[in-house]
Amino acid sequence: MCLALLGLSTGAGSASAAPGRPAGSVTAFDGLAEAPTMKAAAPVTGVRSAGTGARHDYNGDGRSDLAAWYDYADGHDAVRTFIAGSNGAFAAPGVGWEAPVGHYWVENMKRLTGDFNGDGVGDLAAFYGYEDGRVTLLTWLGRGDGTFATPLHSWTAAPGNWSFDAMTAQAGDFNGDGRDDVAVWYAYGDGSDKLFTMLARPDGGFGAHLSSFQRAPGDGWYVNRMKFATGDFNGDGRDDLAALYGYRDGKVKLMYWAGGTNGGFAEPVHGWESTGWTFRQASLHAGDFDGDGRDELAAWYDYADGHDAVIGFRLGTDGKFGARRDMLTLPAGSYDRSRMKIVTGDYNGDGRDDLATLYGYADGRVKTITFTATSDGDLNSPLHSWESAPGNWTFSQVHMMEGYTSPTLLPYCPAVFGHGGWPQEAEGWKEDQIRAANHPRGLAQEKSWGAAGVEADLRLTKNGGKAVMWHNRTTYGLSGSSDSISELTWASGPNPLDGRTITRGPYTGETVYTFREWLDSAKRLGMVVLVELKVETKEALLSSDASVRETAWNEVLAPIAERIASQEIMIYTHDTQLDTELRSRINAAGLSAALTGLPDWYDVVDWQEPPPPASGNYASWQRALDADATRLATSWTPGLTNWMNGRCV
């Protein structure tokens, strides 16, 4: 067979899709996918079963090949096929199939590869999400020469029935009939999850869906924290589903759902776990790397020091993934994982699966690289083959076809700590609108904006007599005469602080609260508190008068000691001298937990009145998510919580 070489133009994006369904002949249509129904697979005789034959073999020579969906800058699309040679190297890509300008939006597709009609030749499939809300499953049957037939349409969901964005698609022979099926992990808007299977028909289309595994909203599964792979891990002739799950506490875990005779899935079995992995630095792959007839998992791990490793896991007799082993180790600088698109397959036809990748270099070159498997299931040194000239292929526009997919990785949303903005410009105090949550109304407002905690300021009245929650050094913004807080008594004397009310801003009419009162208000609202011990308090806290000094420290520490067993309280100060004494006394009192867990600050815009837009912080907030920040303090609480929506889970 001769495959035509094709030079691919550069550019980004694709043209808008034309109205209606993608071009292609409609050879089968099952109607609307209204509601899940349980349906057992009819007995069908196939030519292959899970774990036999080379996966995605597009020319029928017994070796796996690669297929890539290319999204051209002018809006047309094409499938490019890379045929593998006997040593696992790849020939230049040929034209597998093309679509004219405007027929497809690549971002509206969830692509898969598999043998969907059971003829031993690899096919392609994709869910397509239309602008009107319809979702359709299409199949491109392999012709056996590296090309594909026009797509047929089978399973379809009516507008408003299935949400395209809620679907994560997988392929595999889940009922063992010799044809690969399609499974969908569906994440409902209420937080529940369910697995559906669309069984493949002899024509390569798909029948009505059946449902199996499901989880209620309260179980707390996040599909965006899962990396999937499919394979016959237990050797029963049916493909199964596996996933690496990244937990909020930093732990990662492998789990496995066995495929059933009807194409559904059993409850998950939890296996290997680690607290030493960073979830975002691992990618999950599946294949029979040692040729024993059972698929294993292989995780490509990008270590922080720059070196890479492929880590293998086998399913044990207890039904759990374990037996961790190193399959390949590469020194720092060898590869940048973000420039790799990895696909598993038996590329040299020796009965053992290998790893192959399309690699995008910084200079614009694109290259195919193969890591063939050894007889013991390890991986050989990389074999480089086809390579494009710089600028001929645009790496970001290439979408490799694999038998399993994972959703866009989202980090966990950090807990937000609200901090009332204080003007930073010269003489900004004159514009201060007293926004700090130093009182119950402010605490409730921050909670309504989505804050899990607040940062507020602690000051001391005269001679350390009372710890109070107030952000200004003076009574500016309060009723009554203007005085330094440290010169006023709390409730006695001619000019007490108690009873004064806020005279400006959103909390006009609120009063000043003691530290104890404020802590109790926060506890009733279920909010974590971060207390800043203001620098002016050291007049009393570091006083040479022992009576004043101990009275002041008792006002600071006793309320914490009384509550810390049932309430999370953190305290800090910006003053170096005061910080040393604070830490010493906190630790001596057995309250060291109050010094840990402080949120990070990523705001970069100085607060002004009126408040500047939160958008100036977006880039820095994104850096916080990329750094997996667990707690984030901000003066823009509603701006941050709204911005995080859809960017984290």
Image (cartoon, helix red, strand yellow):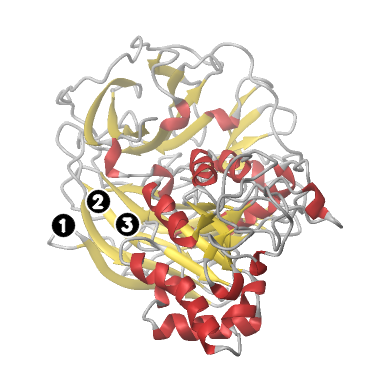
Of marks 1 and 2, which one's residue comes earlier in the chain?
2
Of marks 3 and 2, which one's residue comes earlier in the chain?
2
**Looking at the image, is mark 3 or mark 2 nearer the viewer?**
2
**Residue shown at 59% from the left, 39% from the top:** 2
Asked if residue 67 is positioned above or below residue 378 in the image, the reply reads above
The image's mark for residue 256 is 2
Judge by depth and name the residue closer to the eye, 189 or 559: 559
State the image coordinates of residue 531 (x, y, percent, origin top left): 53, 64
Q: Alpha carbon of mark 3 to alpha carbon of mark 2: how far?
A: 24 Å
Of marks 3 and 1, which one's residue comes earlier in the chain?
1
Q: Alpha carbon of mark 3 to alpha carbon of mark 1: how far?
A: 24 Å
Q: Assess whether mark 2 and mark 1 are in contact (beta carbons under 8 angstroms).
A: yes
Q: Amino acid at mark 1?
A: Gly
Report if residue 348 is visible in the image.
no
- Horizontal side of residue 138 vs 46, given as left or right: right
Binning the other alpha carbons within 10 Å of mark 2 as few (below 14), some (14 to 19) or many (20 upward) gives: many
Judge by depth and name the residue closer to the eye, 479 or 96: 479
Q: Alpha carbon of mark 1 to alpha carbon of mark 2: how far?
A: 8 Å
In terms of secondary structure, where does tag 1 sit? Answer: loop
Q: Quadrant of residue 462?
A: bottom right
Q: Residue at label 1? A: 319
Q: Residue furthest right?
A: 426
In terms of secondary structure, where does tag 3 sit? Answer: loop
Quarter that holds the N terminus: top right
Asked if residue 138 is positioned above or below residue 58 in the image, the reply reads above
Binning the other alpha carbons within 10 Å of mark 3 as few (below 14), some (14 to 19) or many (20 upward) gives: many
- Horizontal side of residue 514 vs 242, given as left or right: right
**Residue shown at 30% from the left, 36% from the top:** 217
**Residue shown at 33% from the left, 15% from the top:** 33
